[in-house]
Image (spheres, rainbow, N blue to C red):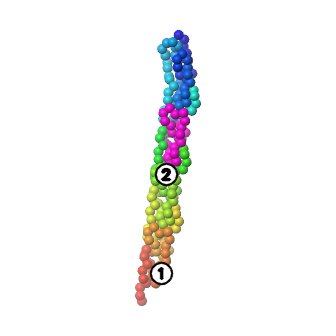
Amino acid sequence: SSCEVCLPGTAPQGDGCSSCEPGKAGRGAVFFTNATVDFFLPCANCEKGLYAPLERSSDCLPCPGGKVSIDGAAECTDCATGKHTVDRQTCLACSPASYSPSLGAAECLPCAEGKVSLAGASECTACAAGKLTVDRQTCVPCPKATYAPSEGAAECLPCAEGKVSLAGASECTACAAGKLTVDRQTCMACPKA
């Protein structure tokens, strides 16, 4: 019998060496033909989060950020919009108040002021006029005596003197002739002299 050496990226097969297929990697081997294997490392599947894109790979490569792989992968796949990866093995939904607008995101982005999102969002949505957000997860109405004139407002503004509003107002209204307000919430008749 004779001693044979399989180079990295190959493994013993029969009386010779064969190339590791994509998705697998091999460190090579030393073996004796027509006898038992002395030192043998077969081509092994790349683990989750790793891949081997070419035939004859000696090592598996880590997936780039925002991509994942299964065992024995020849390529990594992008996480969908609204998701990201932290371990290159699993795509996770973005948490509320954040989003991922593109495929293959390595991280989720926070929603801008005045915008909200639920878990797994690919975009944030502006709060409607008359509402604002304090946690970037839910839109809440502006309290009485305040207003938010446009969608995506960062704050509710106080009504001007002589004007009133109910909760969730996008504008304040003036009291009718003969009425006044002291709390910017309700119009009351002027006292009679």
Q: Give residue 7's position: percent from left, percent from top.
A: 57, 21
Viewer-nearest residue: 53 or 193: 53
Residue farthest along the bottom direction in this orientation: 193
- Give the quadrant of residue 180: bottom left
Work out which quarter of the rendered image holds the C terminus and state it: bottom left
Q: Give residue 150's position: percent from left, percent from top.
A: 53, 65
Label 1: element kind? loop
Q: Amino acid at mark 2?
A: Ala
Tell me, yes or no, if residue 108 can be seen here: no
Q: Which residues are magenta?
A: 62-86
From this view, report whether residue 75 is shown above or below residue 56: below
Q: Main secondary structure of the magenta part?
A: loop
Magenta segment includes 78: yes
Label whose residue precedes the other's in the sequence (2 or 1): 2
How many labels were placed on the picture?
Answer: 2
The residue that appears at 46% across and 51% down in the rendered structure is: 119
Q: Amino acid at mark 1?
A: Ala
Label 2: element kind? loop
Magenta segment includes 63: yes
Disc 1 target residue:
176
The residue that appears at 57% across and 28% down in the rendered structure is: 55
The residue that appears at 55% across and 28% down in the rendered structure is: 21
Alpha carbon distance from label 2 to label 1 = 45 Å
- Give the quadrant of residue 179: bottom left
The residue that appears at 49% across and 77% down in the rendered structure is: 174
Disc 2 target residue:
121
Circle 2/circle 1 CB separation < 8 Å: no
- Crowding near the residue tagged with mark 1, few <14, some 14–19, many ≥20 C-alpha atoms within 10 Å: few
Residue farthest along the top direction in this orientation: 1
